[in-house]
Image: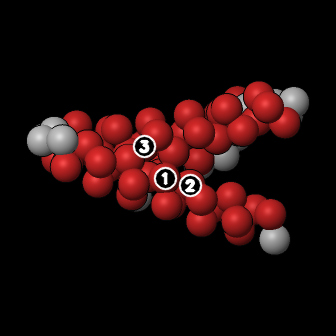
Amino acid sequence: MLLWFDALGMAAYSVIGAAKALSLGAPPFSALVMGVLTACFGGVIRDVLAGEPSVLLRREIYVTCALI
């Protein structure tokens, strides 16, 4: 269940980051990159605070999911 909530949070932060970048006048590609970075680094910060290995260091499709 926690994995599903993590996926929903990542999706929400991707959309929020991209929408914020677009609202500040960023081009669409830059907004896409900012949405991905917002979601991925939010996950990294979560892992650091939880004391777990970063999700980016594991073999998963975390960044690709944020991009899609």
Q: Position of residue 66 (x, y in %)?
A: 47, 51
Residue annotated with mark 3: 36
Please tell me the numbered disc located at residue 60: none
Which residue corresponds to mark 2? 10
Mark 2 and mark 1 residues within 8 Å of each other at the beta carbon: yes
Q: Residue at x 48, y 53 (%)?
A: 13
**CB-based contact (under 8 Å), mark 2 and mark 3:** no
Q: Secondary structure at mark 1?
A: helix
- Left or right for 8, reference 11: right
- Give the residue pinned by disc 1: 13
- Secondary structure of the residue carrying tag 2 is helix
- How much space separates mark 2 and mark 1, taking CA atoms? 5 Å
Badge 1: how crowded within 10 Å, few (<14), some, or many (20+)?
Answer: many
- The answer to which of 54 and 18 lies nearer the viewer is 18
Which residue lies at the image location 51% right of the left edge and 45% below the top edge? 39
Q: Quadrant of the N terminus?
A: bottom right
* Residue 45 in picture, x, y percent from top left: 67, 32
User: What is the residue that sits farthest to the right in this orientation?
Assistant: 51
* Marks 2 and 3, the one that precedes in the sequence: 2
Verify CB contact (< 8 Å) between mark 1 and mark 3.
no
Q: Residues within 10 Å of mark 3 (few under 14, many from 20)?
A: many
Q: Quadrant of residue 54?
A: top right
Q: Residue at x 76, y 35 (%)?
A: 47
Instruction: Specify how the rendered protein is coloured.
Output: secondary structure
Q: Quadrant of residue 48?
A: top right
Residue type at mark 1 is Tyr
Residue type (three-letter) at the residue carrying disc 3: Val
Between 39 and 58, the one lying in front of the other is 39
Give the CA separation, mark 2 to mark 3.
9 Å
Q: Residue type at mark 2? A: Met
Element type at mark 3:
helix
